[in-house]
Each structure stands twice: as structure tokens, then as C-alpha cells.
Image (tube, rainbow, N blue to C red):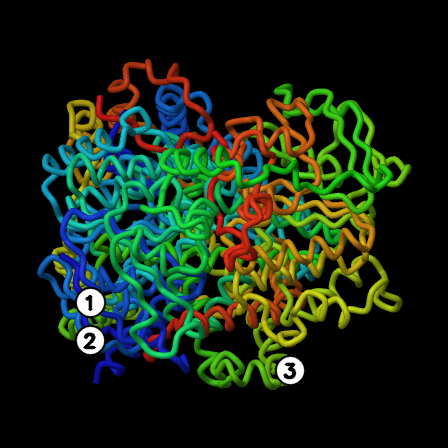
Amino acid sequence: MRRAVSGFIYVLSGAIGVLAFVYPFFAQTTDTALGQAPGQNAPLWTAALVGLSVVALLVEVQGQAISAKTVAMLGVLVAITSVLRFIEVAIPMPGGFSPIFAPIILSGYVFGGRFGFLMGTFTILTSALITGGVGPWLPYQMFTAGWSGMTAGWLSHITQPVTHSTPHDLRTRQPTARLTWDILILCAFGFAWGLLYGAIVNVWFWPVAMGPAEQSWTPGAGLGETLTRYLAFYVATSLGWDMARAIGNVALILLLGAPTVRALTRFRHRFHFEVQPYA
Amino acid sequence: MIRFEHLTYTYPNASRPALADVTLHTAAGAFVLVVGPSGVGKSTLLRCLNGLVPHFTGGTLSGRVDVAGHDPVAEGPQVLSHVVGFVFQDPEAQFVMDRVADEIAFGLENAAMPPTEMRARVDEVLDLMDLTALRDRPVETLSGGQKQRVAIAAALAFRPRVLVLDEPTSQLDPQSAEDVLQALVRLNRDIGLTVVLAEHRLERVLPHVDHMVYLAPPSATEDGDGRVLSGPPRHVLNQMDLTPPLITLGKALGWEPLPLTVGEGRGFAQEVVSGSRFQVSGSELKPETLKPDPILCVKNLSFAYDGVPALTDASLTVNVGELVALMGRNGSGKTTLLKCIVGLLRPQRGEIALAGESLIGQETASICRRIGYLPQDPDVLLFADTVAEELAVTLRNHDLLASPPIAPVDLLAHLGLDGVATSYPRDLSVGQRQRVALGAVTVTRPRLLLLDEPTRGLDYPAKRELVRLLREWQAEGAGVLLVPHDVELVAQAADRVVLLSQGEVIAGDAPEVLTASPLFAPQVARLFPGTGWLTAKDALAGLDVQSDYADQNPMEVSGEDS
Amino acid sequence: MLDARAWLLWALTTLVTASSTRNPMYTVILLLVTTVVGVSCVPDQGGRAPLSPLRFATLAIPLSAVFNGLTAHVGDTVLLRLPDWLPLLGGPMTLEALVFGAMNGLTLTAIFGGFAVFNQATPVRDLIQLTPRAFHAAGVVLSIALTFVPQTTRSLKQIREAQAVRGHRVRGLRDWLPIVVPLLVSGLERSMGLAEAMVARGYGATSDRTQPLRAQVGLAMGLLALLVGWLGFLLRPSWREVAVGAILGGAGIIVGVVWLAGRDVPHTVYRRRRWNARDALTVLGCAFTLAVFLLPLPLMDRHTLSYSPYPGLTLPAFDPLIGVGLLGLLGPAIASGGGQANHARSPRSIGSERDA
């Protein structure tokens, strides 16, 4: 019963996120309540709705209490990820590359979906606080980063990989083949989420750019044309950025992923860190 | 006050119990000292007092624990936090907030204490631990000793009945350790707080200890009872094997009542020396038979961090087969000197030559083919999956994998690690991990070894192992430059001592530095001034006493490195 | 110094205001107002903005203008004509479209500028205290993260040195492995020690606990209402009011659950900031601005808010009363009396100031 309700919450929250991404394509008339000009407040409402979705999910994932171990681990991992951003400076990579996504995905993979979600949201939040990047784009960033961690956690449940083997297994046999497959899938995750992150975060000002009805679309103009415009918008503004991010994620996970996962898994066994069964 | 009855505890997935049938009883207001080698269960025992075992660690526990009327196992750590305050070993890993006052208030906030009362408590506790001046300082700017005092203050904020500390000074330098221990003694004396302390540095606290608990390693005894010795300090010390040099001497020479401090021992010592039966022979230190053949030659080295001078005209030499100890107060530039030698820092002036070849301007990676440098925290080196892999990594870095200067298998055997060659390094004990790190830096067969405080956190058997290894390397012709963490190690292992003060070398040769200077002298030297004896072994040999205790080197005792 | 909550309200007000109008005159005034507040309230070394608003403007406005000019083909004044066969780009490029794009960029700049001031004016510690009680754990995680950043930086340096000492050279991405893995593992080991210390000091849970079932159900219901309401709003214009009601209802349920969850967390605050007159002044100013922009009050010509350059470029209308409404956002600047800019703060200082 509980699992059903939890699952329901995840589905609904995800649906709100998807809708936030997709709604401009459906809006045939725009907000004329309160006598405002069309298309004005849409981004605000959307941001608020996505924000509420994140809040609800956080309450659900956090549960009534998070153990001290989880809190401490999250805190330290978030600190490490913030510090690792300086790798960016050391390796000249274009624009959107940010080394915070690979750790989120890998942590979610090793420690479970819930942990991954918390890790994603808190990393973004802390980064925003430290670098002064708080703004209306924050709910989208948190939403996406959280989901990237969560889905990585689901992957580990689906494939039952090395992370679920016992310490004895780790000592006696080298977990090569399984891990390699999973790493490749995680690379794909990294790529996909790298692009998605940019696409979703763009949503916060896409409606602003859309403008009044007479410019952007005529009622019933059709999904196709609106989609095309959005695609153009996306390509123009952030595709380059997002490609850099996506490729960067792939590179990090491919090159550093396997040993990191092994080290994290061993840590997990050593400290008997139990992963909650749900999510 | 504290009562254990037939306590048996096993960690999850462990084959043997960590604590077997422990029965103990201590009175209120006592200063309890818990001693024993590493890994024997001291930490586990302490954690039973506030319920961390078994609530935090898992595992199975049987028997009864009673602390001031509370049952930690039944009530759990959250309730016990008001009765038992706990301070941990690592000053870096205890703080949640970044300001001192906020950190102290953290626990109180979680207990939902009213703000006015919180302020009162915070002020009270800052005053008690003499930290009022540091109230708004960021925690990262504090020294290790100050951090531990803040941790104690945070534990005291609940006004607990018992304060428990798990090796609080093992990561600290001698001066900070001194401060912390003094604070504890004051707390015990002035406000009658029951203190339970697990420690290696006994000398400072022994005179104040009311009750001592010794946990013996399981192999040493047959039955369960023998594993725990408990009672007044002298009683327990008499039955223990590994004791500070003073105590060892006292037991060997039959001094009664057993002196606990150098002050108490002086009377006995003078008696012994003035007794005409015993001859006082000269220094037992290794005579200079080796022709000085310098491996490392440092001349007039000067280094400044952003204009603040750290080293001024420092010069020293290390000869083949020699172990030189680099001593000095905290902040005198020892680590800076080591870093300059390996190229991590570029000195502004001066010369560094290894076997005649200048090292200035070379890259660290190439310098370290010929110099092995063991950093303060060897754990930072370890990242591979197995021990053998760690060695291979270093070889690969230097492109020596195809033709290693020493076969890794041999090196592992030499280090006593052949049994664990396929183990994950971080699963090993502290001493083993250090040896893995040593292996990783010596696999290139360096001619010079630099060790930065290698005995931090090591217990006696591990230290003995280390000294043995160093001596073997010295015999093979390597030179060793060591920055020591405790004086007794220097007394046992060093051939020469170089003293650094504020970046300048006030050199000397052992034994004068060690025996003449009241700051650095080990216990035996202070006990028998003018004889040149540095260890209990020296003294017993000099006094011609045959004793079972002669071979036992002393446990770590902090010198007065203040 | 203002309370962080007041600043947050201020930032949100600029957001709402900027989004409510397309009239570039108002947007420009808004920009000026935020600049004034920024100059007077932000300490000289407030270096926490990733990008200064000016630089943002130089990027956003031209980019937006050009994008819109190329893709929207409506308007009277044609500047040049791109071949029709080009997908999406083909057609006339009009001045109106360019202007519209530029206006978008201006709006974005205003939003960005408002939040930049917010970010720079509030110390991070105060922001953490803003987290609602229900997310107390999040606040603790953030505190720990901030506390551990300097230590982690030191650790990173130590590890790099240690690896250099065994011959390691950092040449490519793969060479970061011997640095990243010890950093992670040592950090995690430290975190276990930290967890122990937290539990020993009475921090709640030793294991995770889930929400009571009714809270979960409440969340699910709330989300469902939000989703259904939104879908209804978008797809069925005739049910507009019902949809809005559903959205508001769903939001209310979620907020209610959060509030109830907060009450379950036992927690008091050591450093409490007192609400003072300056904060009240700021709040009043924001309320004034919001009222002017959102409520249909008499005497104001609300049509000036919606300006469109199409079909032909005209001068935007301007209502001075609404312009005055924008001045309500000057609250923080007045409250601080202009003296805050002289506060010398160390660049690394991220703690909260003591109560005045």
C-alpha cells in the first residue's frame, strides 16, 4: 500500500515536470486572468508548480527522518562535489560542462534512488547558495538533478549489479563484465541527463521568449510548428552548452566511473550502510 | 555510577566478539583511564556507554550496562546524550557548523531547548573550557587542540554526568595534547565530572587517575576474565606488560610504591645512583663508527610563504645508513623543510643535493624516484583495489613496471604484508595501512626516506615494527630523515637529532639535545640526568640489572615538547 | 542588514513585476531601481554572483533580439528578407521582431539583476535558516556541506601532493582518478565519524523513518489536484475557474502537509534575528508594488502594462502612477540608509552578522 502511494507520488511529480516542459506547445490561448497581457505570468506559475512538485517529492523522499549517517554522507559528498568543480578550471572544457552530474548519478547508482534524489537536489542547492545562483531557475535545476540521481538508483535495482554483492564476492571475483555494462548504461544516462538538464532549465524563460499570440502561434497552429520553434530556440541558445555537458558527463563516467563505483561500494559494505528498500 | 555486567558484543558480520563477558564497576566522580593495544575493543567499550553500540553500529549485545541509572541499550543515544557526553578521536570529523558557538548550540537546538536557556548554556560552557575569546571564530581556523576543546564544550552543553573521550589526543601535537588533558583534569577536579578516557599518552594523566581499566589482547589470556584488568592504577600497572619507561623501570627495580611521575621516581633514582654497587657507564648510544658519507645535503635553505618566512638558512646533512630526527615545536618549519626537499615547494634560496646531484628545480615526480616520502596521513595515498596494485601503481608512474628495482613480492614480504597482498588496503589496520603506503613509496628503492610524523595513531607493536623496518633499510644503505611525533621513538631509533626553531637550525647531536634539554628529554633521561641513558633498556643495562623487563621497549609517552 | 526573508520577498516581487509587464519603460525603471538597491545594500566585496547583471544584459539582449528577429516574421517594418525556403528562418526580418526580442532580453536582465542583488546581500548562513522546519535535515546537510568545503579543499591539496610524491603526474582526465577516489573515500569515512558525533549529541534519527501514511496520501492528492488542474487549465478553457481552484487547492494541501511535517520536528533556533523596522519598511514597499501591479486599482491605466511592438512600432504608453508603484522596491535602499556599502567584509565571510 505504502509503496503504491510512494510510486504514485513519483509518477505525479514526474508528470508535472513533463508538463512544465511540454505545456507551451499545447497552450492555445494564454493567461488573460486579471487583465494581464498574454503569456506574461506563465513562467511564474510554471516555476511555482515545478517548485511545489520538488517540495512534495522532497517531503516524500526525506520521510519523517533521515538517519544521521545519510545526512552526514550527503553533506560531505555535496562538499566534495562543490570542491571538484575546480577540475573545470584545470581541464579546459567548454561552457556547460559541470562535474557535479557524474557524482550525482554514480552516488544514486551505488546508494539507491532516494539517496540519489537527495544528493541531486542538495548539490544544486548548495552550489547555488555558494556561488550566488539562486533564482527562478532553481526549481527546474533541482527537479532535474534530483531525478537524474533517482533514475540512476532505479537502474541499480533493475540490473542487480556488483553493488548488491557481498564483501566476499568482491574479494573473490573481479566484478568486471556486469560493471562494464552498467557503466555504459550510466554513460548513456549521463549523456541524456546532460541534455535534458539544459532543455528543462530553458523552460523557465521559454514562454517569455514566446511572446504574444500574434507572434508566436495562432490558435490551433499545431504542435508541429510550435515544436519546431522550440527546437530552434533550443539549438540557438543552449545546445552547444548542453552538448558540452553531456559529453563531459560521458567522459567522466567512462573514465572514472568503474573505480569510483567500486570504492563507494566497498565503503557501503564496510559501514553497513543499509539502503532503504523503497525507491 | 558505571556498571558493566557480563557484557558481550559482536559486530555485524564478525566472527568473534569484540567484547567478551566484561564486568566492571566504577564510582561516581572518578577519572577512569582505559588502556590497551589498538583494536582490542577500547572504542567499543566506550561506545557502549552512550548507546552508540549497538544502536549506531548494529550487531548483537548481551549483558547489562548501567550508566548513572540509565540503560543505554534500552534508551538509545538520543536519551543518553543528556547523561553522557562523547568526544571522538578525529578533530576534523566532529563539526556540523562552522562557528564555535553555533556548533555548541547544535545539540541544544536539536533538543528544542528554549533560546534563552540555550544562550546561557553556551556562555557557561565556553567559559568553562576557556573558549570565550574564540566564540565567533570559524572552526577551520582553530588548531587541533582548540578544536578538541570545542568538541568537549559541545559535549558538556548538556550538563552530562559522564564525559567519555576516545583517544582525543592521538591526532594532536604534544602541546595541544597537553592542553586538552589538563582541561580534563580540571573538569574532573573542579566540578566532579566523571571522566572516562581511552589514551596512549599516559604520563600526564596518570597522577590524576582514580581507576584504570586494561583490556588485554585476546591471545594473551585464556579465559574471559583475564581480558579485563580493572582497579587502582598501580595495581593494574603492575600486572600490565607494556608500560611507560618509568613504570617499567620501577617494576624491574622493585620500587614501591610504584612511582607514577618522574617527580615521584626521582627519589628512587637518586638512591639507585648513589648506591655504590652500581656503575654508571657512559652513553649507550651508537658510536660514530660510520664514516660520514652524505646522501642528503641541505645548505642555507630559505623559504617564505607569501613573505612570511618559514625557513631561514637551514642546513643539515643525512649520511648513509643514518637516521636523523628533525625535531622542533609546532610550526617551526619541519614539514616545510621536507616539502622543499621533494620539490613540492620551491625555496627562494639555498641548495639541496642528493648524492651530489642538485634537486632544485626538478619535478617532484622525478625527485621521488630517488626519495621516498611518507606523508602525515598515509591514507591519502591509497586508492587501488589491492595492496599489490598499490605498489604497481607507483611503478607504473615511474615507468618501472617492466623492470622494478625490487620485486614487489619481495618488498611485501619484507614489510610483512605478503598475507594481505590481495586485500583492499582500506580494510587493513592502521599499522598495516601505513606499511602499504611505505611500500608504495619505497618500491623504487629510494636512497633517502623522509617520514613525516609516522607514529601518529599507532600503538606500540606497530611502532616497534616500524623501527625494525627502518633499521633494516638503514643497514641496506638508505638514509632516513624523520619528523617524530613522540620523543620515545627518537630515543629508540635516532642516530642524530636536528633541532629546528622558527625556521632556523639549532642543530645538535643526540644525546645532548635529548638529555640536556628539559623540553625534549624522555622520561628515563629526566630520571637519570647526566648518564646519557634514554630508554629503560639503557638504564637497566647500565645498572647491570638482568630483568624480564629489559627487552620491553616502552609504550609511547609524550615528551615535554612544549 | 535586512532579514533574509525580507530580501526573499523583495526578490520575488521583482520577479513578479518583471514578468507582469512588457512595457520597456517599466522594465527600465525596474532595472534602475534594482541597481540603486544593489549599490546601496551590497557590501563592496560581495563576490557571490556568477555573472554581473551588466554582462548578462550584453549577452541576453542582443541574443534575444537576433533570435526573435530571425524566427518571427510578423511586423510592418521589414529590414531584410531571407529566402523563403529556409526552414523557420525564411521570410521577412522585421524591426518589430527585433525590438520584441530585445524587450525579452531586458525582462530577463531585470529578473536576473533582482536575484543577483538578493544573492549578494544575504549571507549564506541566513539563507540556510530560511529552510522550513520540515526540511530541517536539508538545512543540516547544507550546514555540513559548507563546513566541510574548506576541509575538503585542504584534503584535495594533500592528496595531490601525496600522489605527486609517488610519481603521479596529472596529464589527462584519467589521471584524476588517484585524486578523486581517496578524496571520496576519506571524505565518506569522515562522514561516518561525523554521523557518530551527531548521534552522540542527540541528533534524532539513527535510521531512516518514513512519513505517516496520511502525509503521503496528502501529498499524492495535492499533486494530483495540481496536475489535473493544470491540464484542465490548458486543455479546457471553459473550465478555467475550476482548474485554477484545483491548482490552488492542490498547492494548499501540499503546503499544509509540509507545515504539519514541520511541527513534528523538535527544533529551536540559537541565533534568532529580530524583525525590525527596516524589514517592515521593505515589506511594505513590496506590498505596495505588488498591489499596483497585480490588483485592478482605479486611477491606473493597466493597459500600459501590455505593450506590443506589433504590428507597427509605436512609442510605449506610460502611466506615471504605475511608475511610482515601482519605487516601492526601493525599500531596502532607504532602510539601509546607504551606509551598508561601506561595511568591509572579508570575501570569505559567509556567516551571519550578530544582531545589531
Labelled pair 1, 2 in contact (Cβ < 8 Å) = yes
| Numbered tag placed on residue B4 in the rendering | 1
Q: Looking at the image, is mark 1 or mark 2 earlier in the sequence? A: 1
Kindly indicate the quadrant of the structure image that contains residue B322: top right
Task: Determine the residue positioned at 48% across, 73% down.
Answer: A109
Between C268 and C230, the residue placed more toward the observer is C268
At mark 2, the secondary structure is strand
Between residue A169 and residue C129, name the one nearer to us: A169
Tell me the residue at 34%/18% (across/down): C340
Q: Residue at x 17, y 58 (%)?
A: B80
Please give the chain letter of the residue carrying mark 3.
Answer: A
Tell whether B128 sits left or right of B271.
left
| Residue A119 sits in quarter | bottom left
* Residue C67 seen by the camera: no
Q: Which residue is mark 2?
A: B63
Are labels 1 and 2 assigned to the same chain?
yes
